[in-house]
């Protein structure tokens, strides 16, 4: 074994006997001291349905590790439920949790000199948090997705958690009554698993499968299906073999494999959060990657999958239709995937996909054939202009109105904006500005699902624009622009917008423009003063001091 850190601690005989004595107390026998020690990082919790099914997966993973000749060591890490904390002050901890998860996995694995790690996660930040740690440590690693939730059902309609947020907007607009609102709430989330559309959790799991850090088909399995348990056990076996072969994360996470991952994100219509997270993952893997790379890939990769939030189907439908391997094979056959990239199995992407047909089954319409894409180009666009000199991120497909110029309505927080929408104070043609919600200013860069869903529910999705230095949920769609950088807290132009200013959002020309003269902006900037930090102690205060701009991935190291 090329990496002998384990043997340095465990197998040096009497000189290291205290280490061996403590390991005996947790179940090691004489024979176990010559086995690779494999961490199992479990994000199990009952905080969220995304993670409540992970405990049995951790057990099956340990069984697989033992069967393959490894010695598993189980430890826990945290999660924050984005869906539950959405629209509250607690949502400020969501992105923060990504880095807490990464730091905790690094701390446990490096502190205990583990030979490899299998991480199991469900909610949105579990995936990037684990991958950042894996890339940073560079010990053999594999990610196991906790699985997607099955759709809820009401009157013949598939529901997801976003249905509940949109129902609030419909209710406030008088489109549905109390009984219907309650019925949607009661039926939207029927059991364990991560939010069912191509929202952030399923986007990131799909991207990790495409990147080669998870097993084939694993990213779209339902949390409650038996194949998910079998997959966790197989992942444990594959990881032990990767430890023997010393297949390292940085052998897998390369510029080419990140291109593969983002190509799949574009093809499935994935979350804007993938932009933020892959900037951070690339940073940890020391791979050169910028916002401009996303736009480069967007221009050449079509949207092939008809998935929620803007489409028709959910992740379990995608799984039945052939899953991510089918999407990857279509891209590979058309020159948009690097088939020579290594995967955690030791095979190349082309070898993993060799038995997958180049065209999807004609008996389904979840995955479109290459000749009939939903959109000719990808949906995640990078917009720049005097309002976002570093860049911003928008979903630009599935919207009827691709250009809007309107009067700014300015809000200093998400709560202010949501209250205005629910009170009927937002009209067609408005451009809503939510600021001081960035990585430093929030702090924590909250997601804005509550206001964006309320806009959709009120029937204003095609006539109202929204820009923010915060983020959007993977469930958001419409003419909305997030990750505006520089953010307001550091004096970005979004801090200088005044009520009634003319703003242009132009999806065709990738432009985000404040229609005010340079002289006027300079005068406003000379009068601007940074606000006092909202937190001066604790996790959020530390995060605000460390975190980078969103255009670099909001990294903290």
Image (spheres, rainbow, N blue to C red):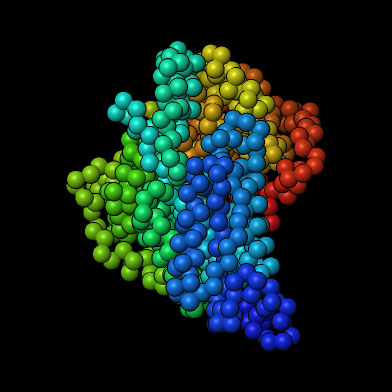
Q: Is residue 26 above or below residue 454?
A: below
Find residue 231 and report its horizontal and vertical position in percent.
40, 60
Find residue 402 and report its horizontal and vertical position in percent.
43, 30
| Residue at figure coordinates x 55%, y 51% from the top left | 44
Res 65 visible = yes
Q: Would you say 311 lies left or right of 406 here?
A: left
Q: Is residue 51 above or below residue 235?
A: above
Q: Nearer the viewer, residue 406 or 93?
A: 93
Res 375 visible = no
Q: In the rendered image, which quarter contains the N terminus?
A: bottom right
Q: Nearer the viewer, residue 99 or 265?
A: 99
| Residue at figure coordinates x 27%, y 45% from the top left | 368
Find residue 31 and report its horizontal and vertical position in percent.
55, 82
| Residue at figure coordinates x 32%, y 49% from the top left | 319
Find residue 424 and report its horizontal and vertical position in percent.
53, 13
Q: In the rendered image, which quarter contains the C terminus?
A: bottom right
| Residue at figure coordinates x 61%, y 64% from the top left | 136
Q: Is residue 423 above or below residue 152?
A: above
């Amino acid at each position: 074994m090329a990496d002998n850190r384990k043997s340095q601690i465990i197998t040096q005989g009497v000189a290291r006997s205290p280490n061996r004595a403590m390991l005996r107390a947790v179940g090691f026998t004489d024979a176990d001291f010559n086995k690779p020690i494999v961490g199992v990082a479990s994000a199990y919790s009952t905080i969220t349905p995304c993670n409540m099914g992970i405990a049995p997966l951790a057990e099956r993973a340990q069984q697989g590790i033992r069967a393959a000749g490894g010695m598993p060591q189980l430890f826990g890490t945290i999660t924050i439920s984005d869906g539950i904390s959405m629209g509250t002050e607690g949502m400020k901890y969501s992105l923060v949790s990504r880095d807490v998860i990464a730091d905790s996995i690094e701390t446990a694995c490096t502190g205990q000199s583990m030979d490899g790690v299998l991480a199991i996660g469900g909610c949105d930040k579990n995936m990037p948090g684990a991958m950042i740690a894996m890339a940073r440590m560079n010990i053999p690693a594999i990610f196991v997705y906790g699985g997607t939730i099955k759709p809820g059902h009401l009157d013949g309609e598939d529901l997801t958690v976003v249905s509940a947020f949109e129902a609030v907007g419909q209710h406030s607009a008088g489109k549905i009554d109390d009984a219907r609102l309650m019925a949607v709430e009661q039926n939207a989330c029927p059991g364990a698993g991560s939010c069912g559309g191509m929202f952030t959790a399923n986007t990131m799991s799909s991207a990790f499968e495409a990147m080669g850090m998870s097993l084939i088909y694993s990213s779209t399995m339902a949390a409650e299906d038996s194949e998910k348990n079998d997959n966790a056990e197989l992942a444990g076996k594959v990881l032990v073999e990767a430890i023997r072969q010393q297949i390292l994360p940085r052998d897998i996470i390369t510029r080419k494999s990140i291109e593969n991952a983002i190509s799949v994100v574009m093809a499935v219509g994935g979350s804007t959060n993938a932009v933020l997270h892959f900037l951070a993952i690339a940073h940890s893997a020391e791979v050169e990657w910028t916002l401009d790379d996303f736009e480069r890939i967007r221009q050449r990769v079509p949207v092939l999958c008809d998935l929620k939030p803007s489409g028709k189907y959910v992740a379990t439908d995608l799984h039945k239709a052939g899953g991510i391997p089918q999407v990857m094979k279509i891209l590979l056959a058309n020159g948009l995937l690097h088939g020579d990239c290594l995967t955690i199995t030791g095979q190349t992407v082309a070898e993993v996909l060799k038995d997958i047909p180049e065209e999807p089954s004609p008996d389904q319409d979840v995955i479109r054939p290459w000749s009939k894409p939903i959109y000719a180009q990808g949906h995640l666009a990078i917009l720049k202009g005097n309002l976002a000199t570093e860049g911003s991120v928008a979903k630009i497909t599935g919207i009827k109105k691709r250009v809007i110029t309107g009067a700014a309505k300015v809000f200093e927080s998400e709560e202010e904006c949501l209250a205005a929408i629910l009170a009927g104070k937002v009209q067609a043609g408005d451009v809503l500005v939510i600021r001081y919600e960035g990585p430093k200013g929030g702090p924590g860069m909250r997601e804005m699902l509550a206001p964006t869903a309320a806009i959709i529910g009120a029937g204003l999705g095609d006539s109202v624009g929204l820009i923010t230095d915060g983020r959007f949920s993977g469930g958001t769609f419409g003419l909305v622009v997030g990750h505006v950088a520089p953010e307001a807290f550091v004096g970005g132009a979004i801090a200088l917008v005044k009520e009634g200013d003319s703003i242009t959002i132009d999806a065709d020309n990738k432009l985000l423009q404040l229609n005010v003269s340079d002289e006027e902006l300079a005068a406003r900037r000379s009068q601007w003063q940074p606000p006092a930090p909202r937190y001066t102690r604790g996790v959020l205060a530390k995060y605000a001091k460390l975190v980078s701009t969103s255009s670099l991935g909001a990294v903290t190291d």
